[in-house]
Image (tube, rainbow, N blue to C red):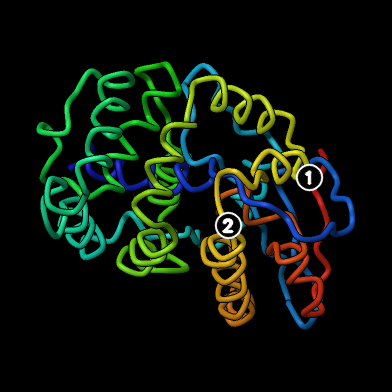
Amino acid sequence: MKKIVKLFIVFAITFFSIKVQAQSRSQKLENSLLWEVSGNGLSKPSYLYGTIHMICSSDYFLTDKTKKAFESSEKLMLEINFSDPKEMSEMRQLAMGKEPLSKKLNPEQLTKLNAILKKTTGMTVQQVDSFSLLTVMSLISMKTFGCLDLKFYEMEFIEQAKKRNIEIGGLESVKEQFGILENAYTNDEMIAMLEESTSDETSKLVSTYKTENIDSLYEVTTDEKFTSQKTKKIILDERNLNWVKKMPELMKKQSIFFAIGSAHLGGDFGVINLLRKAGYTVKPILN
C-alpha cells in the first residue's frame, strides 16, 4: 500500500520536473519556499509552502520557520489528501492501466520505452505491461534521484498533522489529478520526456530547490523542447486558477497550511500572484 502511495506522489514530481515555457515574467519573488497569506478579511494568516514532493533523505530539510508556521496552522491542505482511504482505493485502481501498454502503445513507442526502462531500472516493458504509463513514468523518475532512501514531503506533513490531530484535506481528488496529467500529454510526448529525464536534471532540480529560489525553480521548469503551451496551461495555470477559487473559503474558516508543488508558486499564473490579484497580502517568511 505504501509503495502505491509513493508511486502516485511521484506523479506530481514527474510533472513538476517537466520543463514548461513561461510566456511572461512576473515580479521577482524573494527566496523562500514559505509564504504568509493575510488581509482581505482573514482573521488569521494562512501559509503556502512549496514542496519538491520527494527528495533523498540526505537532502531533506524542513526549516524552523516552516515548522513554526505548520504548528500555528489549524488544517493541512495538500494537492491530494493521501490520508483519505477512499482516495487511496482510487489510487490503487488508477495505478493500473485501462489497457495493457502493449495495446496502448505502437511498436515504435514500445521499443523506445523498453530501452528507457532497461537503461534506468533494468526492467522491460513486459514486466510493467499492466501498469498505466504514468505509473511507469513514476518508477523511472524515482530512479533518477540515485538513492534508495527517498523522503516524501506530503507524507511527512501528514504524519505531523496526525500527531497534532488536525484536519487534512486536498485541493483536488486523485481521479481529477490523474485525469489532468493523463490528458496533458500524448504518448509520444510522455516517452520523449522520459528520454530527457536524467539524474543530472534531477540533481539540478534538487540543488535549486535547496536555495529556496522560487524564480529559479520556475526557470528550471521552463524549456520548450519538453512540452507545449497547451500542456503548461493544463498542468499549471488551470489548476492554479481552480485552487485559488477554493482557497478563500478555506482560509476564512481557519488558518491553513497549503503544501503544494513549488512549480505552482511562481509565474504570472502562479498561486502567489493570483492570490495577490485577488486582494490578499502574500509575503515571504525569510527567517
Q: Is residue 84 above or below residue 119?
A: below
Q: Residue at x 77, y 42 (%)?
A: 32
Kind of residue sitting beneath label 2: Ser
Q: Residue at x 80, y 74 (%)?
A: 280
Percent position (x, y) of residue 83? 31, 55
Q: Nearest the camera: 97 or 107?
A: 107
Percent position (x, y) of residue 218? 71, 46
Q: Is residue 249 above or below residue 159?
A: below
Q: Indicate which disc residue 228 carries.
A: 2
Q: Is residue 96 above or below residue 59?
A: below
Of all residues, the one furthest to the front in this rendering is 108
Q: Residue at x 42, y 30 (%)?
A: 151
Q: Nearest the camera: 256 or 142?
A: 142
Label 1 to label 2, Cα distance in Å? 20 Å
Name the residue tied to disc 1.
215
Secondary structure of the residue carrying numbered label 2: loop
Percent position (x, y) of residue 46? 67, 64
